[in-house]
Image: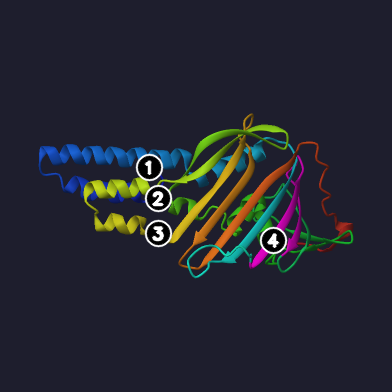
Amino acid sequence: MGFPARIGLLGVLLVPFLAACTTFDETRETAGTVDDAVALMQTVDQRGAAVRVSQGMDDLGAAGVGYEATIVVRQGRLNADGAPDSAAASEWAYTLRVDAEGDLQATLAGGDAPGTYVVPGDQPPPAPVYRVTAGSYACASDDPAATALSAGLAGLIAAHDALAAAPQTLAVIAEPEETTVASREATQHAFVSRVADALRILDTYGGDEALQQAVAAAETVAFSGEVVFDDATGALLRLHSTTIRRDQGQWTEFRFELTQWDGVPDVARPDAAQTARPCG
C-alpha cells in the first residue's frame, strides 16, 4: 500500500483481522474495521505532522528567498501529579538569518556555548560550522552547541525533539485557520492526535493484545501545538510544539517563527584570511 513503515499500525491490524474471519457477519465487520484502519493510515500518511513540517521546510528552502527567524527552546520537569512545571530547567534562544544562497548565521543565547555561528549553504549536511569571534572564524563543527546547526533548521528541529513524538501520537494537521506571519498570507493548522481513533478501532475488534502494544507507547507521550504554512509557496513560517514524556518526567517546548521574508542581507562567509582554524 505504500504507507510508511514508521507507524506500523496497519500491518498489525490486517493479519489478526483477516485470520479471524470465520463467518459472513464477522467478515463484513472485519472489512469495515480494516477500511477504518486504512482511512486512518491514509490520513496520517498524507497529513502527518512530521511529514507536513518536513515538506514545509523543503518548500522554505525552495522558495529561493532569504529570511530571518527566531527559535526558542525550553525544557523542564513534570510535577508529582504529571503536570509540566512552568519553570524551565533550561532555555536556548536562536536568532537566524538565512540569505538567498542558503548561507546561515545563527546567534545562540543560553546553552553551554552562546555565540554567533556561520554555516555555508552550498555544502550538504553535515556542513561545516564556524564560530565567529571579533571578525575571525574558527571551526566549531565538534562543539556540542553547534552540531545541530550543520543541518540548518532541520537539524535544530531534530536536535531539540520538536517533532519526534508526532509519529508516536499519530499526530496530523487539522483545523485550518487563516493568519499572517512576516506579512505573508498563511494558514495555521493545529496538531491533532489520532490515537483515540486507533484505540476505537481496537475496541471494535475486541482489543487485540499485539495491537494494544503497538499504540501503548502513546500512553506515555503527549504532543500538541500548531504549524503555519505560507499560502503562496507552502513554506514553513511558524512551528510551535510541546512534547510531554511522562516516562522521563520531562517536557520540551519548541518555537520557530519567521520575522522577515526576503530583503535579508547576505551572510558574510569565512575566507582564508579570516579563518583562524578551518574545518576539514
Relative to residue 79, is residue 41 depicted above or below? above
Mark nearer the viewer, 1 or 3: 3
Compare residues 118 and 183 and report the one nearer the observer.
183
Quarter of image, res 144: bottom right
Name the residue tied to disc 4: 92
How far separated are the C-alphas under marks 2 and 4? 31 Å
Q: Earlier in the sequence, mark 2 or mark 1?
A: 2
How far separated are the C-alphas under marks 3 and 2? 15 Å
Q: Left or right? Give the position of 46 relative to 136.
A: left
Q: Position of residue 93 (x, y in %)?
A: 72, 57
Mark nearer the viewer, 1 or 4: 4
Label at residue 41: 1
Q: Earlier in the sequence, mark 1 or mark 4?
A: 1
Q: Quadrant of the C terminus?
A: bottom right
How far separated are the C-alphas under marks 2 and 1? 8 Å
For label 4, the SS is strand
Q: Main secondary structure of the magenta part?
A: strand
Q: Earlier in the sequence, mark 4 or mark 3?
A: 4
For label 1, the SS is helix
Q: Quadrant of the N terminus?
A: top left
What's the residue type where badge 3 is placed?
A: Glu
Q: Earlier in the sequence, mark 3 or mark 2?
A: 2
What's the residue type where badge 4 is placed?
A: Trp
Q: Left or right? Give the position of 109 relative to 33.
A: right
Quarter of image, res 236: top right
Q: What residue sits 56% from the left and 40% below the top?
A: 55
Mark 1, other Cα within 10 Å: few <14 / some 14–19 / many ≥20: many
Name the residue tied to disc 3: 219
How far separated are the C-alphas under marks 4 and 3? 28 Å
Q: Which residues are magenta?
A: 89-110
How far separated are the C-alphas under marks 1 and 4? 35 Å
Mark nearer the viewer, 3 or 2: 3
